[in-house]
Amino acid sequence: MPEPRDVTLDINGRRHTLTIEPRVTLLDALRENLGLNGTKKGCDQGQCGACTVHVDGERQLACLMLAVQAEGKAITTIEGLAAADGTPHPVQQAFIEEDAFQCGYCTPGQIMSAVSCIREGHAGSDAEIREFMAGNLCRCGAYPNIVAAVRKAAEVSA
């Protein structure tokens, strides 16, 4: 069994030092060691998108990244999207206004991917949004509302 080591992670603008085994995923470090439970554990195999976070501004599946690989990088989770005063991020607000969730389990990953979709310029059409968001699964089938929320947030951001 590998020996635990210190890993320093910059998450949502705060630095955290954890003593963990080198094989701990970023997802497990976030949830189990830091109590950041907004990032969901769905399939734990990189197929559902529920664990989507941003690492250095790029979307990343936290279940497929080791925490040690994230050392020295800026990590943003769903908890870090809102403004300091609690004002929701425009994508979060659009998800609320468009009722883009049902059970809510996939919502954090959907929102994190939606932010990347807009930031990377892939929200030009509904088809383009659907293509970019295809890696995020919703078992409830809220896809039309999710696309509408991404479109709305993209219009606000433009």
Image: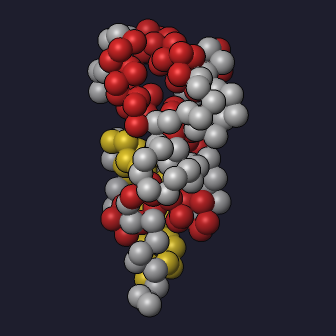
Percent of width and height locating residue 147: 48, 17
Q: From this view, report whether residue 104 is shown above or below residue 3.
A: above
Q: Depth check: 76 or 125 in front?
A: 125
- Quadrant hosting residue 105: top right
- Left or right of 27: which side holds 132? left
Work out whether residue 83 can be spotted. Answer: no
Instruction: Please identify the quadrant where the C terminus is shown.
Output: top left
The residue located at (53%, 22%) in the rendering is 143
Work out whether residue 141 can be spotted. Answer: yes
Percent of width and height locating residue 89: 55, 27
The residue at the far left in this view is 121
Q: Depth check: 85 or 157 in front?
A: 157
Q: From this view, report whether residue 153 is shown above or below residue 58.
A: above
The residue located at (65%, 60%) in the rendering is 35
Percent of width and height locating residue 17: 49, 71
Percent of width and height locating residue 138: 56, 33
The residue located at (33%, 47%) in the rendering is 56
Marker count (numbered): 0
The residue located at (46%, 36%) in the rendering is 136
Q: Depth check: 17 or 153 in front?
A: 153
